[in-house]
Image (cartoon, helix red, strand yellow):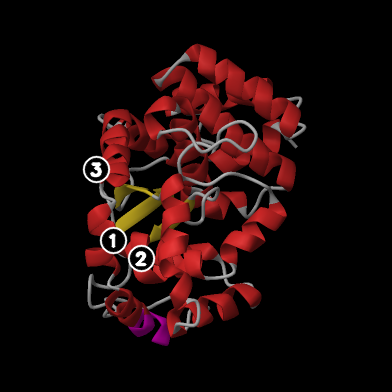
Amino acid sequence: MSSITVSIDNRVRLVGAVLAASNWPDKAQDILRHAVHPHAKLTRHFVTEHRDHAAVKTVNDALSAGVSLTDLFTAVVRAKWPTFDATESLPETVDPAWLSQLGDFYTDTGIAAFFWAEHEEPWTKADEDLKKIFKEDALIEYLAKVQGHSLKRTLNIVPNLTYPSLNTIVAYNETDTYLIIPPPKAVGESPPWPYGEGESWVLAESCRSLTSFLLASTMAQLNEQQQKLLRHGATVMFLDDHFDPFESRAYLVQKRKQESLPRLAEFVEKLRAHLDNDDGRSLLDMIQAEMP
């Protein structure tokens, strides 16, 4: 069985700072108006004068070309800190020169000494909150059960107080999977909640995101409705078994309406029966047979 850890990752923090200087924050607001963490605002102000840096220009070009945030973060977790020497091959969509540009951005901005050192408190609080939420290995044990075998990589839960401010990213290298998770979005345009005040959201977001990642090959063979049933049904079941049945029910009702999934409760029962009673069928076969 793999393990689960919670830690602040400076590589992730640096990419968030580069995104803060890029066109990403404005693009994200065009997609959905939302408030960001106060630390994200401070970060954006700090890096304003570096908007023309090569690392920022490369990100802007990549985003314009449709490169995913997942590929950008996956590239950086395949590099050493703080030299950004690549330790394995990068996603094909990411310019290898970007890693050295990140190292230059880190040095040129002096962000560690002149910004991070003065603003450690929100990161420390985020780290403490997430360690309390993930104090046990229930999530990876459950995901192993859904997947049908133990997770091959260590799971690292990484707080992200900057950018992207709404997107949860799953990045990975040969040995580790990184769940890069923003704070829970508050109602309307209020600042995000602390992680500790949105435990059910954190657990649901983590389970849903990792289910999609770990079962990518199964997802690829399902239609859109079946994919939604799997990612949300697995999350409902996790919340019910390992957190709070009330929160599980609330999540089911919300997603049934938001995602137009009238058979979500039925799917949860079929998923539970499949996981608890091995009938020789794969998860894919069960879904295609029971939820066509």
Residue 3, numbered circle: 3
Q: Position of residue 116 (x, y in %)?
A: 28, 58
In terms of secondary structure, where does tag 2 sit?
helix
Of the residues tagged 3 and 2, which is closer to the observer? 2
In terms of secondary structure, where does tag 1 sit?
helix
Q: Is residue 275 visible?
A: yes
Q: Position of residue 265 (x, y in %)?
A: 66, 20
Tell me where residue 82 sits by quadrant: bottom left
Give the camera-side residue of 76 and 141: 76
Task: Judge the density around disc 2: few (<14), some (14-19), many (≥20) Cα neighbours within 10 Å.
Answer: many
Disc 1 residue type (three-letter):
Asn
Q: Residue at x 30, y 61 (%)?
A: 115
Would you say the residues marked 2 and 1 are in contact, meaning their CB atoms lie under 8 Å apart?
yes
Disc 2 residue type (three-letter):
Leu
Whether the magenta-drawn stretch holds residue 136 is answered as no
Tell me where residue 157 sits by quadrant: top left
Q: Position of residue 186 (x, y in %)?
A: 56, 33
Would you say the residues marked 3 and 1 are in contact, meaning their CB atoms lie under 8 Å apart?
no
Q: Is residue 173 visible?
A: no
Q: Which residues are magenta?
A: 97-101
Residue 14, numbered circle: 2
Q: CA distance from mark 2 to mark 1?
A: 6 Å
In terms of secondary structure, where does tag 3 sit?
loop
